[in-house]
Amino acid sequence: MDFSDLKRKHRSFLAPQFSFECGPGWIGILAVLFAALEAELPTGTVLCVTQIKEKFGGLRVYRQAEPGMPDQLQWRIYRLIALAEARSFHVCERCGRPARLWERQGFFVTACDRHADEDGSEHRGRPARPIDLHPVYERFEDEQVWYRYDLERDDFVPCPPPPGFR
């Protein structure tokens, strides 16, 4: 599957001129996300994905929902997107293999060991160094409960607040 297949299959979310601003390794994450969104949305509900990009080494998915969408549905959509974004920190953006976060001259990339230093940008020749990934924390509809992404479960699990949170 490539980006054009993803666009063709999920026309209800993506305009024909939509452009992905991330690498092909995350297509699988996006395919799972879009299938989950389609299953979650009631027939006739409009959800427009406005931008998909890499930022600080992770996937970012921006969307716009139709006015008046029920809060519970918006929270479920938010959770599905947060899950896709958390998964991206463990998948190589270039090839889709298991990966980790790397830093090179202040720029972050999620890559497998092979692709960590294979970069055609201005950072060529500067070695990347692995970064210990801090847990991805989220709050969903219940503002009193914190969640962190658990890679083994591939889900968010309840947890204490992040260190330093007041």
Image: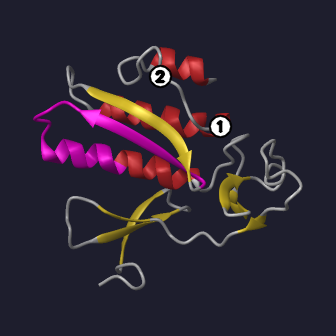
Residue 121 location, x and y as percent? 77, 44
Residue 95 location, x and y as percent? 73, 40
Crowd around label 1: few <14 · some 14–19 · many ≥20 (10 Å): some
Residue, x 84% and y 47% (percent of image)?
118
Which dot marks residue 23?
Answer: 1
Residue, x 80% and y 46% (percent of image)?
119
Q: Label 2, secondary structure: give it.
A: loop
Q: Which quarter of the figure is the C terminus placed in?
A: bottom left
Q: Label 1, secondary structure: give it.
A: loop
Disc 1 versus disc 2: distance between alpha carbons? 15 Å
Crowd around label 2: few <14 · some 14–19 · many ≥20 (10 Å): some
Mark earlier in primary sequence (1, 2): 2
Q: Is residue 33 above or below residue 3?
A: below
Q: Which residue is mark 2?
A: 18
Q: Which quarter of the figure is the N terminus placed in?
A: top right
Magenta span: 57-79
